[in-house]
Amino acid sequence: MRSRNQENKAAVWDYWQKLNHVPNDQVADVIHFAVHDDVDWNGSAPIDQVRGVDALITDVWEPLLRSFPDLKRTPDIFMGGIEEGGSRYASDDGTEWVSGCGHLTGTFVEDWLGIPASGKKTHMYFGQFYVMRDGKIANSYVMFDILSVMRQAGYEVLPPSPGADGGKVPPPAAGDGILLTEQDPLEGHKSIQLVDAMGSGLERYVRERDGGDMSRMEQWQYWTPDMKWYGYSGIGRCYTLEEFADFHQRPWLHGFGDRGLSSNPDAGRVMGFVGEGSYGCGGIWDVVFSHHHGTYAGIPATGKLLTIRDFDWWKRGPNDLLIENWVPIDLIDLTRQMGVDLMERLAVLVEERKGKNWW
């Protein structure tokens, strides 16, 4: 299985490198070589699901390359693994995963998803999970920080992020996130077991009982005090465990905060909970997670039952505590379930600025 994991990572790494270096008129050939014809591709809102490699090319890649013709991918973390039940979140069905996160960078020359082109170099953070079958990509789940692209073009559709925002999301401080070589399986097991323990701590919170008191989660047992938590636009980045509690956990629990609602096997997909070396990763896609209990991102409580798209990459430090966490969350999808269409908000802002020197 370790050799198959290495083969899968090599295939995806080769795919990413070719996409970075071939002329745009050859991108379709590269995609056809690496991706199954019947691929099930799932992207962050408003793109959502695309089925089949030809639709992936015409509906996703061609518009993206028209808007960013010099687009290049710079991964910060790259890893893989085969689900064998090593995590309590993982299945034991042998699903073969490759995942990574980093930046897509290009000059924004043509409108994309209704976002007006800025003509400027633009950085868009991405997070991606692939399911591999026979050495090719069978399923893909990807999140783009589309809100960051809006902001870099001069448009804000949410209140200011509680955490730090703007600029590029930092890579691992140790610069060791690209795992092209085989890793010690014991180290990978330790990483995902630490993630499991941390997740068990989160689940000790009971909204009706605890309210704003987060002490029962005992997160100090799992994170270093100076941990770094890197959220997407709308949430922002936290640079200590205290900031993580104040800028993300407390607003999140106020807005949502249910536990134990994700057990429905027919709702969404739990994906890729694997450890490799000092890194762990995992994600959920369209999984039921909470009712909308309180105001979040300026949106009053609706009481609706919500699903979420949420990815994580964790770094375990030498003291066997978590030191870094990269967390793409699809807020455009989440807020539309709360009755607010952020793409519509953008369209209103764009229309209001037409013909005005708004700056």
Image (tube, helix red, strand yellow):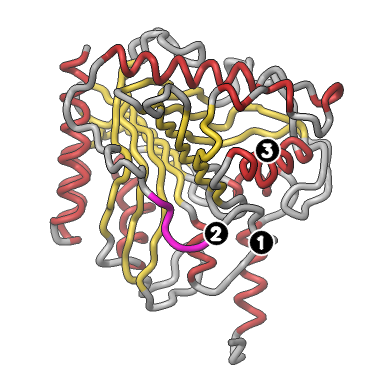
Cα separation, mark 2 vs mark 3, equals 17 Å
Earlier in the chain: of badge 1 and badge 2, it is 1
| Residue 219, quarter of picture | top right
In front here: 279 or 228?
228
Image coordinates for residue 171, horizontal then vertical, percent: 36, 47
Image coordinates for residue 314, horizontal then vertical, percent: 43, 31
Q: Which mark is residue 160?
A: 1
* Circle 3: residue type: Gln
Does residue 251 lie above or below 146 as drawn?
Answer: above
In front here: 263 or 254?
254
Whether residues under marks 1 and 2 lie with C-beta atoms below 8 angstroms apart, the answer is: yes
| Residue 137, quarter of picture | top left
In front here: 17 or 141?
17
Q: Residue at x 62, y 41 (%)?
A: 244
In the rendered image, which residue does mark 3 sit on?
A: 249
Q: Main secondary structure of the magenta part?
A: loop
Residue 169 included in the magenta stretch of the image? yes
Image coordinates for residue 27, horizontal then vertical, percent: 19, 53
Cα separation, mark 1 vs mark 2, equals 8 Å
